[in-house]
Image (spheres, rainbow, N blue to C red):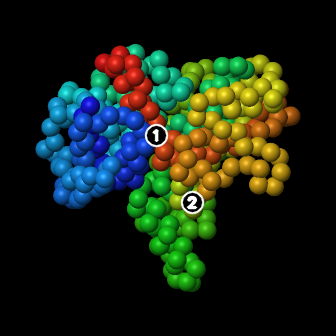
């Protein structure tokens, strides 16, 4: 099994390497691929140094799977070319809503891998990935009618430069210096910005529309979802306040049991001080944590949840590698 990681020097690329190092996927040859400015850099993987090679000249026929973790512009330019020679697992938004490209969270809709047509598989938005993995067992039991979700997303979802800017701004605020925003529309340090991605004509941002469209594609087209996405001054992990309206009646006991028994979910909900998960505690962990489970008495069959997950893992690197694992386990049955 020969594997390439495109964008190997970025946040998601490096996290993909970390996940692969812990997994049992047998890799014969590993190629770390990036733009010209990163060519020649050396990255350690399983006690061996690998030199980064140039994306422009890389021969994708040398690999079986390519992980694309370099953003939408790179995927737009190179993913389809790569897919002529290998299977592409793409982390960007470029192909997510393409009807010929499956959008996959393996625990939720692995069967969709049977319909690979372009040799490309899309990874969902990080906020969507952690949401659907918690929704799936509940939808199977109680049939979700409507969802209202507010996200509280870390700066790592925007890349390394925004992470660096958060640290820089925080230092300046504490030192009483003037703050200038380069990667955000307003100061991010000690603030909350209700704006992620560009605005559409209807007033929603693309991030909010992604959550609705992707949840429908992955889980069920009948589900109605409205979202408000907020950027917080947090390094890693996304949090979500989720209000669900079911078609069927439910009990909190059945909800907790279903979530705890579903792969990738973990309930932490003791209804006492500290009896819930926070972004800091989710960082570096594979699970999607669910807390604050309670009935919404203002609507029939209503439920409230608090969901937290490491966005670089669950929403990106881990999900991508789990897609690869699923394909390998099933002998590339979608190809």
Which residue shows up at 58% across the image and 21% down it? 220
Residue 176 in percent (x, y) is at 56, 84
Whether residue 217 is visible: no
Distance of label 2 from label 1 (alpha carbons): 20 Å
Give the quadrant of residue 305.
top right
Q: Residues within 10 Å of mark 2 (few under 14, many from 20)?
A: many
Residue 170 in percent (x, y) is at 54, 73
Question: Which mark is on residue 318?
Answer: 1
Q: How crowded is mark 1: few (under 14 residues within 10 Å), some or many (20 or more)?
A: many
Give the quadrant of residue 222.
top right
Whether residue 278 is visible: yes
Q: Left or right: where does residue 240 sit relative to residue 20?
A: right
Residue 12 in percent (x, y) is at 40, 48
Q: What element carries label 1?
A: helix
Query: Exactly how many numbered labels are in the figure?
Result: 2
Which quarter of the rendering shows the N terminus?
top left
Which residue shows up at 74% across the image and 28% down it? 257
Which residue shows up at 23% across the image and 43% down it? 31
Q: Mark 2 points at which residue?
A: 234
Q: Nearer the viewer, residue 1 or 335?
A: 1
Q: Left or right: where does residue 41 sit relative to residue 127?
A: left
Question: In the displayed structure, would residue 207 be above or below residue 335?
Answer: below
- Farthest bottom residue? 176
């Amino acid at each position: 099994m020969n594997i390439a990681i495109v964008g190997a020097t970025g946040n998601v690329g490096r996290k993909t390497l970390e996940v692969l190092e812990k997994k049992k996927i047998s890799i014969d040859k590993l190629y770390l691929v990036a733009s010209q400015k990163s060519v020649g850099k050396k990255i350690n993987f399983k006690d061996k140094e690998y030199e980064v090679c140039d994306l422009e000249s890389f021969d994708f026929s040398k690999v079986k799977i390519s992980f694309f973790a370099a953003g939408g512009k790179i995927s737009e330019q190179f993913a389809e070319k790569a897919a002529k020679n290998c299977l592409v697992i793409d982390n960007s938004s470029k192909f997510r809503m393409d009807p010929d490209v499956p959008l996959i969270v393996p625990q939720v809709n692995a069967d969709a891998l049977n319909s690979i047509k372009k040799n490309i598989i899309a990874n969902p938005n990080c906020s969507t990935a952690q949401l659907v993995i918690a929704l799936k067992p509940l939808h199977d039991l109680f049939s979700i009618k409507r969802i209202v979700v507010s996200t509280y997303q870390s700066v790592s979802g925007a890349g390394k430069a925004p992470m660096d800017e958060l640290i820089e701004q925080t230092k300046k605020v504490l030192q009483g210096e003037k703050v200038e925003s380069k990667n955000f529309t307003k100061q991010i340090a000690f603030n909350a910005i209700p704006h992620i991605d560009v605005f559409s004509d209807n007033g929603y941002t693309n991030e909010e529309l992604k959550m609705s469209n992707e949840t429908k594609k992955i889980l069920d087209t009948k589900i109605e979802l409205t979202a408000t996405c907020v950027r917080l001054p947090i390094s890693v992990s996304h949090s979500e306040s989720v209000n669900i309206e079911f078609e069927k009646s439910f009990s909190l006991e059945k909800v907790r049991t279903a979530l705890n028994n579903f792969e990738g979910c973990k309930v932490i909900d003791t209804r006492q001080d500290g009896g819930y998960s926070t972004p800091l505690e989710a960082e570096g962990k594979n699970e999607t944590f669910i807390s604050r489970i309670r009935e919404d008495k203002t609507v029939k069959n209503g439920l409230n949840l608090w969901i937290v997950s490491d966005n670089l893992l669950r929403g990106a690197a881990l999900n991508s590698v789990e897609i690869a694992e699923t394909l390998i386990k099933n002998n590339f049955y979608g190809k």
